[in-house]
Amino acid sequence: MSIALVLLIASLALQLVAAALAIRLVRVTGTLGGWVLIATAAALMALRRGMALWAMAMGHRQPKVAEEALALVVSLLLVAAMVRLGRHLGEARAARDRLASSEAKYRQLVDQLPQPVFETDRTGILTFANRAALERYGYSGADLENSLDIYGTLVPEDRPRAMER
């Protein structure tokens, strides 16, 4: 078995691994877009390597060591990048999940307080209000979903002063 043939087979295998890793990253990230394109590109690269292998088996062409070595290096880099991205994106997703869990615990705790507690974004839109706040000020969860503007609840002459803070 020639060195070029070994390189060709190794490159073919690595490109299939890269395609599988890209599909796995769809599950890790929850997005299709780019990962399907990368998986398709890796699968097409593997198909090209397979066609070269077929041509060699049929006696039509002998692979060149330099070409196959380059293809192998590209395949190795692709797989290494996918593994590294998978780790990074997996860690980022785990951190987002931990943050969401922590926020849910915080909101549940705050919702049990007897004092009104609310949160706004920088533009004054209410993003959270506990049960005590809703009951005390006569609002509902639907009011929050409809982008309730806290500044709109103030008398007009107090709005500029409140917006300064």
Image (cartoon, helix red, strand yellow):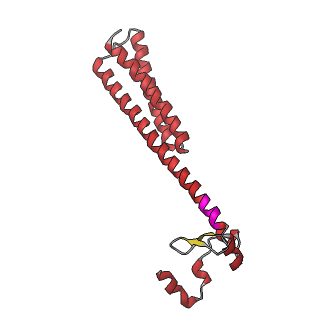
Please identify the quarter of the rendering in which residue 76 is found.
top left
Percent position of residue 44, x then y:
46, 28
Q: Residue at x 35, y 19 (%)?
A: 7
Residue sitting nearer the eye, 57 or 111: 111
Q: Is residue 6 above or below residue 133?
A: above
Q: Residue furthest left?
A: 66
Quarter containing the N terminus:
top left
What span is in magenta?
A: 104-110
x and y, in percent, of residue 112 in the image: 67, 67
Residue at the (38%, 11%) spot, across then down: 60
Q: In terms of depth relative to the viewer, which is nearer, 30 or 139?
A: 139
Write down the quadrant of residue 100 in the picture: bottom right
The answer to which image quadrant residue 63 occupies is: top left
Residue 154 is situated, as x and y percent measured from the top left of the image, at 59, 85
Magenta stretch holds residue 155: no
Please tell me whether the stretch drawn in magenta is mainly helix, strand or loop: helix
Query: What residue sits 55% from the left and 75% below the top?
Result: 124
